[in-house]
Image (cartoon, rainbow, N blue to C red):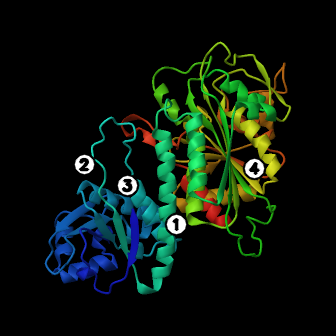
Amino acid sequence: MEFCTHTSVSIHQVKTAALSVGIFTDGVLSPAADVIDRASGGAIRAVLKAEFLGKANTTLVLRSLTGVAAARVVLVGLGKQAEYSARVHAKAEQLFASVCVQARLAEATSTLVSIACPDTTVTDRARSAASSVSDAVYYYDATFGKPDPDARPKLKKFTILIDRADLAAAGLGLKQGEALGEGMSLARTLGNMPGNLCTPAYLGETAKKLGRQFKTIKVSVLERKQIEALGMGSFLSVAKGSDESPRFIVMHYKGKTAPSKTATKTTAKAATGPIVLVGKGITFDSGGVSIKPAATMDEMKFDMCGAASVLGTLHAIAQLEIPGEVVGLIPTCENLINGSANKPGDVVTSMSGQTIEILNTDAEGRLILCDALTYAERFKPSMVVDIATLTGACVVALGGVNSGLFSKDDALAEALLKAGKQAGDPAWRMPLDDAYQEQLKSNFADMANIGGPPAGAVTAACFLSRYAKAYRWAHLDIAGTAWKGGAAKGSTGRPVPLLFQFLLNQA
């Protein structure tokens, strides 16, 4: 996908297959829409009275307007002007791109970035436009026997019209949005692939490919014997139930050194070490002996979306070459059933030396993450964020809108919340009170791996917190946001936008 900027004082003379202009409710035209209306002899205002109200998430295509060089002018509804927001803008860009995809167009031009929007810059809006368009043109056909070439989107070039003074800022935003879009596409494709193809070995090979593609990323993929040598007994206990060999993926990104600057409230407590991202990589989760219900179990191929988000984020920051140092850690295996699989009541020893009574084998994500969190200590990190499709309880609590955010570090939590808001990939802070730790007590080990039905997402985070005491830490439960079910079944690529924006802000 090619993203371009263009400046023109004569919008009506721009030759393009489709030109988007924004319309607010009550007949309020954006500046670009007003120019087109005047050039066409009032064609836009005429249809506003008859059939288009400017409501958000609506479009109307006008073809071959007199006095206008664009083959199509697409009116994009923006809702009430007083309620215009970054989220509305992002959806408008995505909707325009979808119209172009459906029309089988190869290129299109948008004026929407030029519309002022509260709490955003031109760079923000250009980044949002590029990532939204990338989302609209994403198409999965990797596992179709005979992919339909006509079904693939033909949109290959997307241009934004912007004032000359804003060209540099818009160009930067497009570059950022393009990198984000490619990172999200990688994460989505990995999530969408079936578990028999996207195995732990496949994730390891994907990481190695990134290492070959970007010289700023060094990759190590540890196999069973190396994992055993590290003493990751908790992680390996989950892998025992599968014939697929586990992998522990270490990705180390080193960008250019960031220029020195005065510490802010967000970064004041940060040490000089790397930021570490830890992604849960269960490539298929049957639940083990505590087997899941058959209905929708196919969706458990998405249980590696935390790992996919780490790979996608590393791809995005390496493509953009942001300053700083980031480590990605991915423990990956399957959770299946054989004669060696974990049983309820088993006790395993984690890399930290703490023992765990496994009361439910379907609470396996925390069993692989805890060893990765211990491993993270060796990097002396400035902060660690783990990302996991961890609990159904988080889906019940927050649905598919917000990811669950858990942290006792207020500055880190606020930085992640801010990044999510900026990126249109929101999170909601959840409690992490010490009183919840009581639910993890065990009569036979240092802790149990579940705390019972009450506050299940919270006790899962409490479990992980016991392995993250050596550094600043936050946990993102993405069980409700990483994929969609039903007719829209598929990976969303979240929370790559949140993580990407967070790392941009830190850099």
Q: Are marks 3 and 4 in contact (CB under 8 Å)?
A: no
Between residue 482 and residue 420, name the one nearer to us. 482
Q: Secondary structure at mark 1?
A: helix
For numbered disc 4, what is the local secondary structure?
A: strand
Quarter of the image for residue 76 reads bottom left
Residue at 56%, 45% in the rendered image: 206
Q: Earlier in the sequence, mark 3 or mark 4?
A: 3
User: Compared with residue 33, is residue 180 higher up or lower down, i.e. above or below?
Assistant: above
Q: Find residue 224 and report its horizontal and vertical position in percent.
A: 71, 31
Which amino acid, mark 3? Ala
**Picture coordinates of residue 40, whole percent (x, y):** 17, 79
Three-letter residue code for mark 1: Gln
Separation of disc 3 and disc 2 at Cα? 16 Å
Type of amino acid under label 4: Trp
Left or right: 485, with 120 as reference point: left
Q: In terms of image quadrants, where is residue 147? A: top left
Residue at image location 40% in from the left, 83% down from the top: 163
Lower position in the chain sequence, tag 1 or tag 3: 3
Left or right: 41 with respect to 18?
left
Find the distance from the CA under tag 1 to the CA under tag 3: 17 Å
Check disc 3 and report the residue beneath it.
136
Name the residue that disc number 1 marks.
Answer: 176
**117 to 421, vertically: above or below:** below
